[in-house]
Amino acid sequence: MKGLISKAFPALESRNYRLYFFGQLVSLSGTWLQNVALGWLVLTLTNSAFWVGLIAAITTLPTFLFSLLGGVVADRFPNRSILIITKSSETVIAFILGFLTVTGNIHISHIVVLSFLFGMTIAFDAPARQAFAADMVEKKALSSAVALNAGVFNCARAIGPAVAGFSIAFVGVGGAFILNGVSYFAVLAGLLMMHFKEKKHRHHDHPFIQIKEGLVYAFTHPTIRSLLFFVTVSAVFGWSHLTILPVVARDILHLNASGLGFLYAASGAGSAVAGIIASAFSRKTNSTLFILTGAFLYGISLFLFTLTTNLWFSYLWLFLSGFGLLTLLSTLNATIQHIVPDSIRGRIMSVYVFMLIGMLPFGNFQVGFFGEMFGPWTALRICAAVVTAYGIGMFLKHMRLPKTRLDIGAQSQSRTDI
């Protein structure tokens, strides 16, 4: 059985990766618990779809502003040390948010400030976290690690929201925030228990010169440039569909906080299954096929979600849309990671984070704006149409990408002098 698991998921052969995997599962479940609680709290305080989108945009704005600098930090310093600092900071923010809510002193202005501070930690956490996979596993297991990272994120997206509904019912919104703070102890313990020597490339150039080098590499490499543009489309018109779910749950499906949690859980479950499948087939998959299939499945399923008010069909379409979106994003990530050399990995992944999380403020704003102006169904249909159209456009151009199972690092070796 152990050999079968290792063959299917080669990244789990690494002790360090196993520690990280299970710590992240607990921690990210807490983070998703907080996301559901925060969306519900903002909607309760403001009764506005616009404010729900705006708070989500404020949370991701620092990534837009600082993630490229975060990539420089990831290339200069050990990623594990960066993650210990960022996770500790997120723990403190969660406890402060919980204390203010429990004591009845929470105000929308507090949420704005704490959301921005949380976003600041993500701006440095995300590039280090993306690059950290290559520190923990061998090159041949990198696609598996990337897919499992996405899978554990989305397993947490299934577990956390489901727990959120019950947590809010029994311990309140503030208690949910505190539970998230406690959940960070799991990933911190895993990071502290790891044993390995991290190889870092010591750079003495000015940070802005290094940022420029990363941007030049990313946008002059034709394959990486095309992949990053699709990441941006996925962020603005794909990932942002989750922002409007509190409004759909309350105003259209007439659900409470527990019902909202199950909607998130359905989407997360689909993404988790996609992550597991992507990891298991990481040595066999063709990037083009997985990217195009993921985009098409996401768009069609999300559109069908907007045509029903039946709860079970809603779960089904959200499950399939989550499956499609995760298939798309994990394949984009894995393909980029295989192309880039280690010496510039942190900066390239910071561009990836910039294009994904950094673009979310625009996605959250647009889905909140269209949701307020034309209703949440129209906002979601716009998201579905754009992602599907972009995927079809790539197909019509017959874009050919490398297979993720191949070691294509040789394509980049001539550029490792950056």
Image: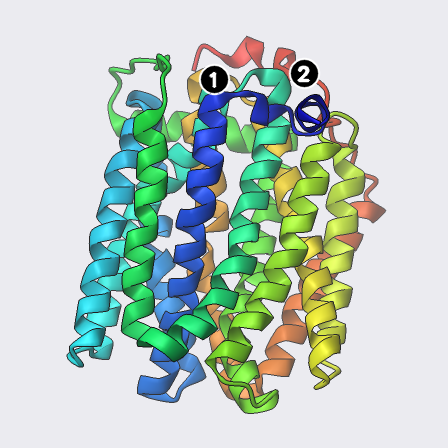
* Quarter of the view holding residue 280: top right
Q: Is 196 rendered above or below residue 184?
A: above
Q: Identify the secondary structure beneath mark 2.
A: loop
Q: How far apart in space, not on screen, are marks 2 and 1 (Cα)?
A: 13 Å
Q: Residues within 10 Å of mark 1 (few under 14, many from 20)?
A: many
Q: Is 174 rendered above or below residue 358?
A: below
* Quarter of the view holding residue 379: bottom right
Q: Quadrant of the N terminus?
A: top right
Residue 145: % across, % down: 57, 30
Q: Are marks 2 and 1 in contact (CB under 8 Å)?
A: no
Q: Nearer the viewer, residue 76 or 257?
A: 257
Q: Residues within 10 Å of mark 2 (few under 14, many from 20)?
A: few
Residue 46 seen in this snapshot:
yes
Residue 157: % across, % down: 53, 57
Q: Is 239 rendered above or below residue 130?
A: below
Residue 214 seen in this snapshot:
no
Q: Amino acid at mark 1?
A: Asp
Q: Earlier in the sequence, mark 2 or mark 1?
A: 1
Residue positioned 52% across, 17% down in the render: 341
Q: Nearer the viewer, residue 55 or 31?
A: 31
Kindly identify which residue carries mark 2.
407
Kindly identify which residue carries mark 1.
342
Q: Quadrant of the C terminus?
A: top left
Residue positioned 79% across, 27% down in the render: 284
Q: Amino acid at mark 2?
A: Asp
Residue positioned 54% across, 45% down in the render: 152
